[in-house]
Image (cartoon, rainbow, N blue to C red):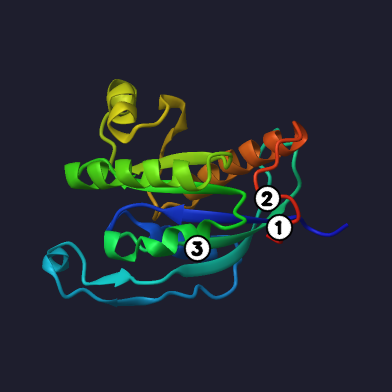
Amino acid sequence: MSTPVRKVVVTGPFGAGKTTFAATVTQGLGGGTLTTTETGVSDETAALKASTTVALDHTSFLVPPGPGSVWAATRVNLFGTPGQDRFAFMWEMLAQNMHGYLVLVDASRSVSIAQAAGIVAAFARIAPRSPRLVAVSRWADPAGTRDQLAYLLGTSPSALVPCDPRDLDQATTVLRLLLDGVHTLENLGVPVVPAGADA
């Protein structure tokens, strides 16, 4: 039996850890080569990091099912978006035919939260039927601040999941949760990609 393939997009603000997340799962889940389109930063954001994705990141790997999962090991084609607004035209292009997406946000930086809220709203317009999780790093108090952070991001509290993009176990957990959502919708007969689309 062939392994199902799902397209997942990782998006979020500049410096939220999208390329790091892709590198973590590529290395840890036996993926192939991580392709990146990073270039040096020439504006004021260089104080935060030296390079940025200008088109996309891409990798592919196999996500093993977790305990109690009702889906088999699943091949994921992962696409990472640029985080800066000037490359926002890539968001819609990369979102085409995706099965679900992750929004990464750094909870320790208010500017990251504000930028992530705009990305959450943009992707809700682009792909209103696609399952979404918001993977939150540097989240000091998940229990105490969940409702407030969800309000600031414009999403449901249940969509927020703590995740250090450098941690393979946490990154894998987030992917499994997202694939749970994809599988649930498919079993309900709700298409998460347009009919006839090639993932």
Circles 1, 2 touching at the beta carbon (< 8 Å): yes
Circle 2: element type: loop
Label 3 secondary element: helix
The residue identified by callout 2 is 194
Q: Amino acid at mark 3?
A: Met
User: Dot 1, how many residues are within 10 Å of its Cα: few (below 14), some (14-19), or many (20+)?
Assistant: few
Which amino acid lies under the numbered mark 2 shown in the image of this protein?
A: Pro
Left or right relative to 85: residue 166: right
Q: Pointers 1 and 3 in contact (CB under 8 A)? A: no
* Rendering coords of residue 69 (x, y %): 70, 37
Q: Residue at x 46, y 26 (%)?
A: 158
Closer to the chain start, of discs 3 and 2, is 3
Is residue 115 rendered to the left or right of residue 28? left
Q: Which residue is mark 1?
A: 197
- In the foreground, 73 or 40: 40
Q: Crowding at label 3, few (<14), some or many (≥20) Cα neighbours within 10 Å?
A: few
Residue 142's place in the image compared with 5, above or below, is: above
Between residues 17 and 167, which one lies in front from this camera angle? 17
* First reached walking from the N terminus: tag 1 or tag 3: 3
Residue position for label 3: 93
Separation of marks 1 and 2 at Cα, in angstroms = 5 Å
Percent x, y of residue 88? 36, 60
